[in-house]
């Protein structure tokens, strides 16, 4: 009976994710409160997972023992970190606690769900994940067509796009990007029906009309990686004469059709206008660089008899276009100048004490004498390292690295798993999530987003290691 209740509680919590994000948006926009329903609910779930993994169910396998030791280490570290930070610095206790909850939500819940999964294998289907995404994209669509949506960007920034009734475009965009591969594969693997068609259409529209880079790149990445995978496996299986259940013709038709629809809508979408506004000058330079300089000698050019000779004074000549593409400018533009913030925090970390290098700078960092900020770099891996130091980072990524290592080991033992579309889909979602975490942030350090990376990892583990 307890197994059934635990499983139902897990599924209920996952299903409530879009509702929690809607309630969080409402509270953030209309109430001046330090905590929202989203933070409270997810914090309670994290505490429950922590207690469950340590005291409720303790499997005897070596990997589970290591997992519990990692959790104990995280618990000791968090107490030490908060104690040191609050005693040695003039900082806000609420800000530090909120920061710790947001950052350590991922490793704690990942470990807790991994142990819960051992007791009673969690069933995470593509259909289930597609419906979750439909919850997000459906809200964005309804809010947009009724004209009651919120802008993806603040009024003082340039940027078109709709975030529906949700709050943070960065987080919602990351959720859409991570769940997109499951929606694409679900429509490929199953017969066409009205729900599947609506889900992929709303996924395309949300990726384009949110106006932000992350869901747009996530959609392109999902389709692109899938297409490369299909071409590679088709050639490989033909050469090696390996039998496979993959229907290459059907997959190719679906991927190409989805790609055509996506491209057809792209040039009229907010994301296209935003990209051209922010990166159009870089694209123009790249095109000029590829084409090369167009030098024409007036002395050798045939002259039209009716052409009037015009003498242009030196000061009236157009300035030469600088065709040099500065790598730092390019990277800075693509990462929205996050590298500049990262460099500033890096210099502070270098000058910090040994203790701070080990336990981190904390979530409120003193930039200059008397001036502090809780602004993040928005590159998750760097935020984790600088704010929680060497010890915190090792504990943070310990469980993730251990699980990925076990999965890779199993893949080496049975390479035929790489011909399973479900497995490839999980790998695409995890890759996109980690890539987005480093380039745009708001993935590993955002509980609303990181739960979907956790689901992808558990699903992949069950497929590869457990064979479910």
Image (cartoon, grey):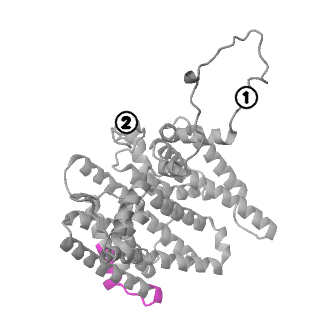
Residue 135 in view in this figure: no
Q: Does 464 sit left or right of 12 as displayed?
A: right
Label 1 sits on residue: 296
Q: Decide if residue 153 is in sight here.
A: yes
Q: Is residue 368 placed above or below 457 in the rendered structure?
A: above
Where is residue 374 shown, x and y percent of the image? Answer: 28, 59
Residue appearing at x 22%, y 46% in the figure:
30
The residue that label 2 is drawn on is: 146
Marks 2 and 1 sit apart, C-alpha to C-alpha, by: 56 Å
Q: Which residue ends up furthest to the front in the rendered image?
A: 314
Residue 54 within the magenta-colored segment of the rendering: yes
Estimate the x, y position of residue 88 in percent, counting from the top left. 20, 73
Front one among 385 and 308: 308
**Which disc number belongs to residue 235?**
none
* Picture quadrant where residue 398 is located: bottom left
Task: Give the total number of marks visible in the rendering.
Answer: 2
- Of 288 and 252, nearer the camera is 288
**Residue depicted at x 77% and y 62%:** 235
Callout 2: SS? loop
Which part of the image, by quadrant, shows the C terminus?
bottom right
| Nearer to me, 138 or 73 | 73
Along the line of sight, which residue is nearer the eye, 432 or 350? 350
Q: Does the magenta stretch mainly form a helix, a strand or a loop?
A: helix
Circles 2, 1 touching at the beta carbon (< 8 Å): no
Residue range of the region highlighted in magenta in the rendering = 47-63
> Furthest-top residue in view?
306
Q: Residue at x 75, y 69 (%)?
A: 243
Q: Is residue 333 left or right of residue 226?
A: left
Q: Of the two numbered discs 2 and 1 on the same chain, state the one appearing first in sequence.
A: 2
């Amino acid at each position: 009976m307890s197994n059934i209740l635990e499983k139902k509680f897990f599924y209920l919590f996952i299903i409530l994710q879009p509702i929690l994000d809607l309630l969080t948006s409402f509270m953030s926009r209309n109430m001046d409160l330090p905590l929202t329903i989203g933070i409270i609910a997810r914090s309670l779930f994290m505490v429950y997972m922590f207690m469950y993994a340590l005291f409720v169910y303790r499997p005897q396998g070596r990997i589970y023992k290591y997992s519990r030791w990692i959790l104990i280490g995280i618990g000791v570290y968090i107490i030490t970190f908060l104690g040191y930070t609050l005693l040695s610095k003039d900082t806000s206790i609420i800000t530090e606690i909120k920061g710790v909850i947001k950052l350590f939500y991922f490793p704690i819940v990942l470990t807790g769900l991994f142990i819960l999964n051992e007791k009673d294998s969690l069933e995470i289907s593509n259909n289930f994940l597609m419906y979750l995404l439909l919850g997000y994209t459906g809200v964005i669509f309804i809010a947009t067509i009724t004209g009651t949506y919120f802008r993806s960007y603040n009024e003082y920034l340039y940027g078109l796009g709709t975030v529906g009734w949700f709050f943070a475009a960065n987080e919602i965009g990351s959720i859409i990007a991570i769940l997109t591969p499951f929606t694409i594969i679900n429509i490929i693997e199953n017969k066409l029906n009205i729900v599947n068609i609506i889900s992929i259409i709303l996924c395309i529209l949300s990726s384009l009309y949110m106006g932000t880079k992350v869901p747009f790149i996530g959609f392109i990445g999902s389709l692109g990686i899938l297409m490369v995978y299909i071409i590679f496996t088709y050639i490989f299986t033909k050469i090696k004469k390996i039998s496979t259940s993959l229907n290459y013709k059907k997959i190719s038709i679906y991927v190409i059709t989805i790609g055509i629809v996506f491209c057809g809508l792209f040039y009229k979408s907010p994301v296209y206008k935003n990209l051209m506004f922010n990166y159009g000058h870089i694209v123009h330079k790249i095109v000029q660089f590829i084409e090369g300089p167009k030098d024409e000698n007036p002395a050798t050019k045939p002259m039209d008899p009716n052409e009037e000779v015009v003498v242009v004074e030196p000061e009236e000549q157009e300035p030469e276009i600088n065709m040099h593409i500065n790598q730092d400018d390019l990277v800075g533009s693509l990462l929205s100048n996050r590298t500049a913030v990262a460099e500033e925090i890096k210099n502070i970390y270098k000058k910090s004490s040994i203790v701070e290098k080990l336990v981190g700078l904390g979530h409120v960092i003193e930039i200059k004498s008397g001036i502090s900020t809780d602004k993040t770099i928005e590159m998750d891996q760097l935020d984790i390292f600088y704010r929680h130091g060497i010890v915190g980072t090792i504990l943070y990524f310990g469980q993730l690295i251990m699980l990925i290592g076990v999965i890779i080991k199993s893949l080496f033992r049975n390479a035929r798993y790489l011909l399973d579309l479900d497995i490839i889909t999980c790998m695409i979602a995890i890759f996109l999530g980690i890539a987005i975490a480093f380039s745009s942030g708001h993935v590993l350090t955002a509980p609303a987003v990181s739960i979907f990376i956790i689901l992808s990892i558990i699903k992949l583990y069950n497929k590869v290691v457990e064979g479910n």
